[in-house]
Structures are given as structure tokens and as C-alpha cells.
Image (cartoon, coloured by chain):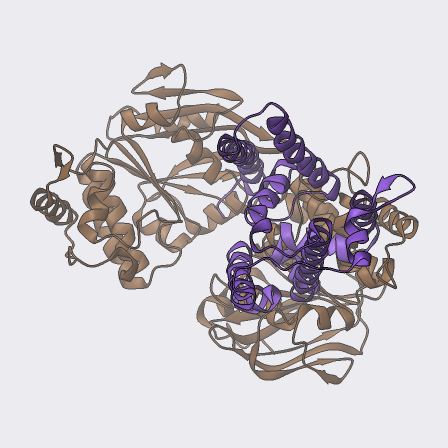
Chain colours: A purple, B brown
Amino acid sequence: MNAVLAVPFGINSVIATLGTLYVARGTAQLLTGGVAVYGVPDEYQAFGGGSMFGIPNPVLVMLIVVIAFVSLERFTLLGRYAVAVGSNPEASYLSGVPGRRIQAALYVLTGTMAGLAGVMLSSRLSSGQINTGVGFEFDVIVATVLGGTSLAGGEGTVAGMVIGALIIGVLANGLNLLGVPSFWQTVAQGVVLVLAVGLDVFLRQRLAARRRRAETAGRHGSA
Amino acid sequence: MTASIRATDGVSEGSSPLLRLAGVTLAFGGVRALDGASFAVAPGEIHTLLGENGAGKSTLVKVMAGVLRPDAGRVFWENVELDHLDISVARRLGIRIIYQRLSTVAHLSVAENLALGREPTRFGIILRQRERRDAAAALERLGVSLDLDRQAGALSVAERQLIEIGRALQGHLRVLVMDEPTASLGEREVERLFGVIRSLRTGGIAVIFISHKLAEVMTISDRVTVLRDGRTIDTVSARATSSSRLVEMMVGRAIAQGFQEERGSPGTEVVLEARDLWTESVLRGVSFALYRGEILGVYGLMGSGRTELARALFGADRLAAGQVLVDGRIVAPGSPAEAKHLGMGLVPEERPQSVFDELSVRENISSASGDLIAPAGIIRGGKERRLASRIVDSLGVRTTTIEAPLRSLSGGNQQKVVLGKWLMREARILIMDDPTAGVDVGAKLEIYRLIRRQTRDGASVLMSSSELPELLAIANRILVLHQGRSVGILCGEAMTQRNVLHLAVRGVAAGGAAD
């Protein structure tokens, strides 16, 4: 759905994603009338709530997903092209890289992963609740940016993102353990996001300034 | 240094230089943009900086404006040495630059643009009446009439340029630098601009004018300083010099002397043929045939369609009409991806369009060869490294390792990587759009050798260039474009600077030299 919106029409990817998120959330509320859905089968509960070899299932799933995506990033053409299209769309096009197909594939993959996360969550809570996912979109952005991914595209790694997510998780957990009220936790998250993005912008400007110098050297005449 | 002494002597009106630079050197990475350049400008003179692309004109101007700090060299203002020149000092002295990329704000009106940054206010409220009055006064000073309420975005380039001059005039202005102001102006607009520039001269302002259109330079300038490879060749009085003497100074003999290899002998099979190509906006009927093993040069003035031709052949821009034939079969590359599978490769005009600066040399080289290194979508790391190393070795790319990020390479080496990207997939038809723009002379020669070598190995090259001596030295034949049309193909004895220029400027052959 997001792919359909963002790829051919060029709608900003974050906006497209937020738009469909609200449509989906609203639809869910319409369907359930805002009431939580209970009574899921035990097997379904075991998926998110159980454990294997003493390791909770969600952790196992996370490990599998991370390994899969790191491999995707490192060893496949899709991973390579994802970075290429993000960092220089024009150069990618002129190299014959199928940019739109790559972008669409990435949207589908992210959508699938979001779906998987939803299944895990409802299984762990053994119920379907409308509001459990509220604010996750924000956490995801914070985690990604903290992990070094550029919102402008072309930069970032799966490993970095995992670290970003861990920082967010540890931060939330730590604040909980310290007994910080949840309202303040929200404030803290906002501060962390702005700091992270601010740092990103700052470093990028320095890099751009350096690049400009180098570029002037490259052409060093009239353009 | 001799040049700078001559320059100061050359001010005949007895006025001493306002701004003088001596022995300015500025290098970025491996490239020496300025190599001991000297320059002096006097109040009330129009002084042109002349030189080919990459001669160092823009860099020198940026030094004057304090945008770039030189590594070495001295700057004098009214014969007093400045210990440093940064943007704020330059501004205080009254040195202003009007860049090619104009900085008018599209959504503001003419009056608002003229006042931009120095709006008359009281208690933070803009005094609109005064703003309009000042704007009208500024335009009158320039001797032009523009509707004060029109949005700048609706104006022509020439009109926006006038706004920028007006803006500069409102502050303290002693030296006005214009970087190729006539590049996209029509004849009448150029005349008007020159009128304005002359009136500035009368007002005692020093005007530094950058251009490489010789006729214009001869018309407007009092003096001309020629730069080449970051050095000042000479400063001469425009009246006492001929344009051919200026060309000689600009071009030098370095390239022709440095490149005396035997031209290859192309085969007889046509590998790429264009029949009456048109695009929506620029191409107006381009036809040619490219033979196996041939280097076909493409020359034309700015706006003649060189870049559009390269992009259209490669499927990057849509053709409105015409046919492209590869090996005698009609093909219609609808995208670069298709063109690539027909054995074509494109080295685009601007390097930012062809490189991934953050990615490694290896990743850049293999960026067009996904099908070779990853047959089933899984990258064969070993094969990729082997192929990339081979390309780096054979092209002599100077890099510490193939894992170094591309941006750490010099311009010439980056360009070799772009070429290498197509050699990795053994492209037989290389389309190169000004491949040596902005690389230093040494790297240029290497690139020429590489291009020659590819044609000996059976590849065919369509190479456009903004530097004619380069094409004369390397190409087997030269295709000349004029206003989007192919107006002739010159070869052999007829392939001279005079004939090519004549065709490019007028669109008709000089004495039946074209075939």
C-alpha cells in the first residue's frame, strides 16, 4: 500500500506511511468498536509468549530477522541497490539500476516486518488492543535515527538500527526502573530524538562543507 | 609574479589597483586549482578573466570574495596588504559576486528582492512605501524598468540578474564580480547588461567579468587576464590584442604536444546509428553513424544539445522522434537499463550524476554490473573484488585500496572509476559527455590514452567536449551540433579548429568543408 503511494507518485515516504497508519488504525477501531479482542487460541499465545531453549520466542524471532536482514544488506543485490538508490538516485538511474522496483520491494519488506511485529505483540498480550501500538511509529523513527540511518536516504545499517532500538528499549526500561512517571518518559524520548536528529544535521553540514570544498577543487574553473 | 607587476603597470589611467592578488595558490586534495595566480583590478575598469573550463577563474573569484582561503599568496587592497580576507571583510570592503546561479527569491516581488536582507523597518515592521521607493530608485540607477510587484520567479534570467546588480548597488560597492553573466542571455539582453556594466564603470566601480565568449570579451573589456591551469598567463589591454592571440594564450600547446599518439583506424561496420533524432525541447534532428573502433567527437556551443544527445541515446531522456540503430537493428532504449544491455555505457556530463561518493571504489565500479556479480541476486563477493581490482589496475586508478570511499579520490581518478564501471561489463559503445571537464591536465592525458586503448580493443566512442582542441587531438571525426541539429561531420584535412567553430557558430560550413 505504501509502495503504491510513495513510489509512483513520489509522496514522501514518512508521510505515506503515517497516512496509511492512520487509515489502518481508524479501520481497526471501526471494526472492533474500540473494544479489545480477547480469546485468542493457546497456540497463538505460545508464539509470542512462549520460549524455546530457555530463550523467549520474541528474542529468537528478533535474532532470525536481524540475521536475515544483515544478510540481505551485505550479500544481496537488493541490499546493495537500496543504498545506491538512497544515496544517489540519478547515478543509480544512469547505471541502469531499477530504482522503483527496489523501493517497492523495500516497502513490502518493511510492511511485512511491521505485520510480524503486530502478530508478536498481540500474541504476547493474548489480545488485540487498539492502542498498544500507539507511539510505536515514533519509537521506530527514533531508533532508526539513533542507529545512524539518514532520513535523507543512502546511509544506515541494520546493525546500527538494532543498536538504536536497544538504546530506546534500555532507556524506556531504565526510566521505568527508576520510577520516572510515564509522562516524563515521553518527554525524554522527544528530547533524545531531537538531539539525535540535531547531531545528524550538524555532522551532515560539516560533511557538506567539506564536500563543497572538494567539489570546487574538482571543477576549479567556471562550471 | 611577473604577471602581477605587468598588471599594475598596465593601468594606464594612472589609477593604482584597488584590489590586487599576488601568487595565490590553492589546492584541494590532489588538484591545484590555483598555482601562483596573480591579478589586479583598478577602479573604473572592466576587467575580464578569461580561460578554459578548469583554468581557475571561479576559484580565483571565490578567493577575492573571501569564500575560499588560499594556501599561499598575498592580497592587497588599495596597496595595503590584508592579513586575511574572509566573507565579512570582503563585504565590508565592498566586494560583491554575482554567481551564475542567481540568488533571487522566486516568491518575492521585485521590490522585496531588491530590499532583501536590508529591508527598511520601524519597530520591526517593514516600511513598504520606502521599500518601493528605494527599489524604484535602484532600478532607475541601472536605467531599466521593471514592474516592482512582479514575482521574481516570473522574470527572465536577464531581469533577475539586473535585480542582483541592483541589490549589490544598494550597499557599499567597489568591486563587482560577475561569473559568466551572459551564459544564458540572448543578444539583446547581453547588450542591455553591457550598458549597465558600462554605467557602473563610469561610477568608478571595478567590474570583474568572467566569460569565455571571445567576441563579448573584446567588446566589453578594458583589460583581459588570461588564466590557464591555475596560473596567470598574462594581463593585456583588450584594445591592443587580437582574439586569436587570446585563444593562443588560453589553449596553450600543452595538450596537443602531450598527446601525439597515432589515431586508431576505425573499421567499416556501423555499430551505432542515429537517424533524425528529436527530443521534446532541444534536439531538432540529429543524425550520424559511429563506426567500430572509432572516436566520434561531438562539438557544439552551450545549448547546442550535446548533453541531450548523450542522454537520449542512452535512453535516459525520451526521444520525440527518430531512430537509434545498434548493429543495424532498430532499437529504442527506453531506459538506461535497456541501453546497458545493448552494450552501451554513459559517462555523464557532471560527475555527481554518475558516482556514489559514500560507497567504495569497488561498489562504484560494480554499480552497473549487478547481473554479472550477482546472478541470482546474491552477490559473489570474491568475483566482484577480482573484477573490480582488475579494472582498477588496468585503468591505473590511484587509490590505496578498492575499499576506499570514492570521495577520497581526485576528480580524474573518480572519472576513471566511472569509465571502469562500463568496462567491467565490456560496453562496446561508450557515450562520454565531456569526460575531462574539471580534471587536471595530467589526468586528461591518461583519460585520452584509456579512450584510445578501448577503441583499439574494438569499442566505439561518442565523445563530446567543451574543449575543441581536445577533440581535434583525439577524435577520428567530429560531429558538429548547432541549435539541436547536426550540421556536419568533419574529418581528415577539413577537421580544423576554424572549420569546426564556423559550423558550430553559424550552422553552415565554411567553404564547403563539411560532408
Q: Nearer the viewer, residue A204 or A156?
A: A156
Q: Nearer the viewer, residue B104 or B297?
A: B104
**In percent of the image, x 46 and y 71: which residue is there?**
B483
Q: Is residue B202 left or right of residue B314?
A: left
Task: Name which quarter of the figure residue B271 lies in.
Answer: bottom right
Decide: is B500 above or below A76. below
Q: Nearer the viewer, residue B255 or A125?
A: A125
How far from the left and from the top, in percent, is residue B492?
68, 68
Decide: is B76 above or below B359. above
Asked whether residue B292 is in view, the answer is yes
User: Across the whole image, how many numbered discs are drawn on residues?
Assistant: 0
Can you say which quadrant of the picture contains the N terminus of chain A?
bottom right
Q: Is residue A50 left or right of residue B308?
A: right
Decide: is B33 above or below B98. above
Asked whether residue B260 is in view, the answer is no
**In percent of the image, x 42 and y 54: which residue is there?**
B213
Q: Is residue B419 left or right of residue B179?
A: right
How far from the left and from the top, in percent, is residue B272?
72, 76
How far from the left and from the top, in percent, is residue A210?
56, 33
Decide: is B281 above or below B226. below
Task: Name which quarter of the figure residue B158 lies in.
Answer: bottom left
Q: Is residue A54 left or right of residue A222?
A: right
How far from the left and from the top, in percent, is residue B189?
27, 60
